[in-house]
Amino acid sequence: MTITSDAGSDLTPQVEMVTVVVDGVAIEIPKGTLVIRAAELLGIEIPRFCDHPLLEPVAACRMCLVDIEGVPKPQPACAQVVSEGMQVRTQLTSPVARDAQEGVMEFLLLNHPLDCPVCDKGGECPLQNQAMTAGRPESRFDEVKRTFPKPINVSAQILLDRERCVSCARCTRFAEQIAGDPMLELLERGANQQVGTAVDQPFDSYFSGNTVQICPVGALTSAAYRFRSRPFDLVSVPTTCEHCASGCSLRTDHRRGTVTRRLAWDEPAVNEEWNCDKGRFAFTYQEQGRVTTPLIREDGQLRVASWPEALDFAARGLSAASSHGVLVGGRSTVEDSYAYARFARVALKTDNIDFRVRDSSDEEAQFLRSAVAGTAVRTTYETLEQAPVVLLIAFEPEDESPIVFLRLRKAARGGTRVYAVGPVATRGLAKLSGTLIPAKPGAEPAVLAELAEQVRAELQAPGAVIMVGERIAGIQGGATAVLQLAQATGAALTWVPRRAGERGALDAGALAGLLPGGRPLTEDSARAAVAAAWGVDSLPATVGLAGAELLAAARDGAIGALITGGVELGDLADQSLGRAGLEAAGFVVALENHHSAITELADVVFPVAVVTEKAGTFMNWEGRPRPFAQTFKDALVMSDAVVLGMLAKAMNIAVGASDVAGIRQELGALGAWTGPRAERPNVPAGPVAEGAHLVATWRALIDNGVMQEGEPYLAATAHLVAATVSATTAGALGNPESVTVTGPLGSVTVPLEIGAVIDGVVCLPLNSPGCVLYRDLGVRSGQAVTIKGAL
Amino acid sequence: MITTGLTPIITEHWDKPDLYTIEGYRRVGGYQGLATAMKMDPDAIIGQIKDSGLRGRGGAGFPTGMKWGFVPQNDGKPHYLVVNADESEPGACKDIPIMLANPHALVEGVIITSYAIRASHAFIYIRGEVPHAIRKVANAVAEARAAGLIGDNILGSGFSLDVVVHSGAGAYICGEETALLDSLEGYRGQPRLKPPFPAVAGLYASPTVINNVETIANIPYILDRGVPWFRQFGTEKSPGFKVFAISGHVVHPGIYEAPLGITMRELLEYAGGIRGGGEVKFWLPGGSSVPMLTAEHLDIPLTYEDMAAAGTMLGTGTPMLFDNTVSVVKAVTRWLDFYKHESCGKCTPCREGTYWITGVLEKFEHGRGTAAEVDTLVNLCSQIAGRSFCALGDAAATPYPAALKYFRAEFEAATSTSADEQFNPVASYVFAEAATR
């Protein structure tokens, strides 16, 4: 514990310290600390079940009873705060405490089944462990144990064996206090008390897996892991989650070359001890549909090729082309993105590169180059927690960055006010006690320009934060308006992309007009410095093509060869453009780990590693590097960077290091850019689309995403796929049970739900089962659709 | 100080058929205390209740005035008065009769108390199983509202009050004051962690006073007749009078209002003695949660302090008396079964301990206990008492050790002889004479 005594600094809170004595050892700690924490600081472990440092004390299990001098009864250490001079005696020095703990342990084991040999928790079970330290050798209980039919599903993913439950209420408190999804509750009384859900409301929380992890017994298990392994047979590796830009620390457990489960790992600065269900359960994709060997196209058919043959084939194809483009799918590590950025400039001598294979705009590129790339970390999870006010634009944190959502919820419970600009007061916003500033899709810039004076004033407070999501790219004038608002109010502006690789790819220079570290390509000194570092005479000096322009150029035959890395065609709003671009490009080299529409169109396919097969770094939304090690040390699959290095070699071009350590060294040597930044966008707000029903849409956390494949239990906990409209809009439609929504490409029929949506807007999930907007309707956010009641 | 004889105060006019109406109550001097109180400064009322020495009639006997004084004033938060009318203690039956016969005494007390603690919202939380009492109180509240005694600007004082009659859903734990608050807020009734105490953060996290029905019903009389009048009853540490509800094997079970300090022997005389001229085997001064006493304790004054000195508690002041026909093993088993059924489940010792003890006691009841278990049960009770979350666990751990103290032989006999063999169950029935005739 560091207490700075920096006189005159009013940012350093004055902490009142008290001295307490635990088992005869004195310790000075802040007033208000719980006895159980004070003991921990001294290395004294008081047994506990209901206590969890991130949950409010409940003092229900009574396992942590200690003897406090002057107090007649033993007190729960998890709920008792220290006071000056307090004398605490734990089980180590007090027979009373020892007796009380042994008594509670005996009681806890009364109705607990002796099924440790078949229980998933066996081997990592706090009850098992503490029964060893605080239990009696033999039970005196000779009566009939309480039993329940087992197990019951509290959701498709989470199973509950009620007879194992010790009623610690960690799961119910997590659901209520942390996730804000109080669908789990204790029911019944006395020994019949049990965890349960309402009849028609399963525990479909995005964070449900955390309850399995914090359950101190084997009462809660996941369908995905149940009966799959014994904890002591697993090898555990600390890793970083690859699913979104939150950057969670995970622990990956594997056995015989297969990942068996993933857990949230302790990272106070980022995810604390939580993660979302996607991060926890969606890893089966790593093993399915893999590209296992290089493939080359011969007579229109892909065939297996050896590495030398495929590398030679690709090198010749790339060298033959006179113009090139590089598409990086936004899911790459910093190191791989850097390798693409360097390969494009050095080997292909082009600046036609983009990591944004999704809805993007030139305005967004300008915004990212000028205000995000290579900037110093300003907003973090910690500052977010302390922010007086947070304004969200084009960002639904619960779906698009769930750990940001959890920290925002913690902040909101502590008094942070949350505003969201948009057409929907989402379920997530309600859980943040947030306020919607209504804006029709596309009207956000106008609404931001005329923000209420009171909100504007709040944003001027020190620590105020504006969070903007990647969907800002789809709003003409959006990024411009956001930048203006941030400048006018002084609020910290932070960009929260959805994919894990985007922030890192930006800093690695995988965007036209941008070199690593936020260096503008158009700055001579920046270009010269990077050219020197890369050992080349010069770099392309004109800003290349990006986004839809790059694809359009390919479609028009202006791109001789394309390299794609981890690209999913379905991510593109205009999928016909993407397909046409790839088809028209003279030569396509795909670095992919899975077979997809891209590999079907490529001329050469190289297999590359998934996250478990390589080391790397994801840079999260904060700009914080989240490095991770290789899970499977003996994996033979190479990373994108290594393959690109081999490809360059085959082209007789030296591109520098392609191993993780070497690339990190190169990036480190380049350092941050302190020179002039690229110009800010200045784009006027676009018109709001005409039409009775405008679409508001984003990707649900659990949806059709390719990295969620092969995990049916997770998929079954997705939120209801429905068209959500206001009561007025529903009334105008005649309040049908379901509706058919029609766009230029076709229709979907989904249930109709009434929600906090502004009139004239229909909210639909972007890529969920039965509702894939880009493919089925051909619309993106802000465009008009027609809606009819379905029969 | 008067500590003998019957002193009907709250029960004085219970023979009047219309006492439950506002006219009937007014005819016997009702709402005089309110008129007096509304002319007083709220702090002066708190002072007067402090001076009266009135102690809570719900069981714990905490000084009422002191409890009111804990409510922080000028804190900018709303204050609440909550009346605990969730009378569910086995053997206790005094609040429900008060609400049935004299509901306006409660309502008047609520108004005065709310005024004193600056609460503009009061709740009367009544046990759900007594709809007849709920109807009586709701009617009394409606009458008082119609008479301008509840609502805006009461008696021109500028003080406004709303009173809500709330029905519980039948859980004993909701008589625990913080569980009652959770229940009242719409949550599952389970006790809350203290601190914060309700006086600081109670209902809706605001300062809250929670008082028993009988406590509140005392208030109008103290205001109307004064502290010296009140203190002439009872003892120095237990001033006032008490609605004793006597049940069990007495000739005339019922309500006997008498000064604190009266003995059980005297009360028993008023109740006509034990039926058939029998003897008291054991008795409990105030509900199943207090340790039992025997015939040798009949002369101890019924005060908070004397009962504590005798190793028990006055509790709710509702004596249960059992004659020699009763198996103590069976009685204790019934009580433990009650606590097992009513344990809320929140904390381990109470939830699991009552489950275990009840199982063992049921074996004793059927003559299948073991000698070792006679002592194991003592140890189990000691693992619950003082280690559970709230007083329900302590209460559950009470009957067995107390019974064992006086009737160990009966439990030892129950290792081979069932309770029904030791004591013919039919003989203990209230209608036993008719049944055996």
Image (cartoon, coloured by chain):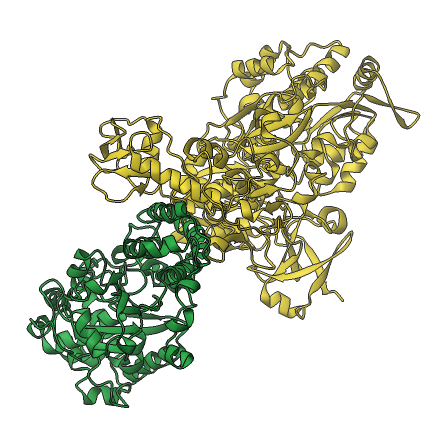
Q: How many marks?
A: 0
Q: Is residue A23 left or right of residue A116?
A: left
Residue B253 seen from this side: no
Q: Residue at x 74, y 34 (%)?
A: A551
At 40% from the left edge and 42% from the top edge, which residue is drawn?
A104
Q: In this view, which residue lies farthest toward the right?
A: A299
For residue A757, side relative to residue A570 (left or right): left
Name the spot of residue B15 as percent of width and height, x first: 24, 88
Depth order, front residue of A701/B56? B56
Residue A45 occupies quadrant: top left
In x, y percent, where is residue A700? 63, 46
> Up-down: is A664 above or below A724?
above
- As rendered, which of B434 and A607 lies closer to the eye? B434
Is residue B28 rendered to the left or right of residue A693? left
Chain B representation colour: green
Q: In the picture, which chain is yellow?
A: A
Placement of the N terminus of chain B among the 4 image quadrants: bottom left
Residue B218 is situated, as x and y percent measured from the top left of the image, at 19, 73
Pick the front one: A244 or A275 = A275
- Quarter the C terminus of chain B occupies: bottom left
Q: Nearer the viewer, residue B292 or A192?
A: B292
Residue A171 at least partly seen: yes
Say whether residue A331 is left or right of residue B38: right
The percent position of residue A151, horizontal first and vertical second, equals 62, 48
Image height of A112 relative to B11, above or below: above
